[in-house]
Amino acid sequence: AQSVTQLDSHVSVSEGTPVLLRCNYSSSYSPSLFWYVQHPNKGLQLLLKYTSAATLVKGINGFEAEFKKSETSFHLTKPSAHMSDAAEYFCVVTLYNFNKFYFGSGTKLNVKP
Amino acid sequence: NAGVTQTPKFQVLKTGQSMTLQCAQDMNHNSMYWYRQDPGMGLRLIYYSASEGTTDKGEVPNGYNVSRLNKREFSLRLESAAPSQTSVYFCASSERQGENYGYTFGSGTRLTVV
């Protein structure tokens, strides 16, 4: 069985401070992991993906995530938040050669001026 | 622009009415998906089509039917709409079964059932 848990439903940071969005997964097999972002009234955009290559993955807009198998985590980070980062973020897990993607419940990021 | 196109963007239905949500992709992807998004629940898979000519149920298929019309198009039908089907619906596609390049999503259809 597979599942993904986003530990925080809301995160609030000040502009210019670091961002940490937490994601833990459970999977019987080696997973592929993704982070997506959704801005208000928009579709989902792929930020980054982990597919068993380097454990530290760099994505768009300065985001990165580290795959830690021992902790079954795939947390999303950014050194310095920007107002335009305010959005909802989804952690997604899938099994290689398996055609279903499992979404976390989402984390809403608020960035204060 | 290449991508996934969903129509309509907004729809209001009365309970019991039927409608079809349309989805088309022009990236030559083999696999297509329908998700619904509800507050606090993330995205839940309704149906998917691994390849042209095949469809399978996802987590929440009840009350829906799908048709993979051809490689490009994957439609979602509500035969008798219920208020519980008020949601935002996303269509997505991916290259082919076994590949894990992630999804390309459409911009969504906001459906309200009154």
Image (cartoon, grey):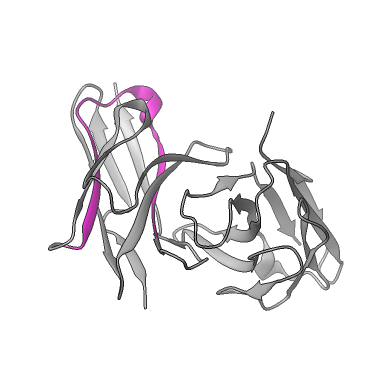
Nearer-the-camera pick, A82 or B112: A82
Rendered position, B102 above or below A42:
below
Q: Is residue B58 left or right of residue A7?
A: right
Q: Position of residue A83 (x, y in %)?
A: 35, 23
A111 or B1: nearer the eye?
B1
In the rendered image, the vertical position of residue B16 relative to residue A58, given as above or below = below
Residue range highlighted in magenta: A72-93
Q: Residue shown at 26%/37% (left/top)?
A: A64
Residue B100 percent location from the top left of the image: 46, 54
Residue ID at (41%, 63%)? A96
**Side of B90 where A85 appears, left or right:** left
Q: Is residue B43 magenta?
A: no
The residue located at (22%, 25%) in the rendering is A80
Quarter of the rendering containing residue B2: top right
Res B6 → quadrant:
top right
Residue that protrudes farthest toward the left in the picture: A70
Tell me where residue B52 appears, x and y as whole percent: 74, 63
| x then y, percent, for residue B58 | 58, 73
Using the image as rendered, state which of residue A37 and residue B17 is in the foreground: A37
Q: Which image quadrant: the N terminus of chain B? A: top right
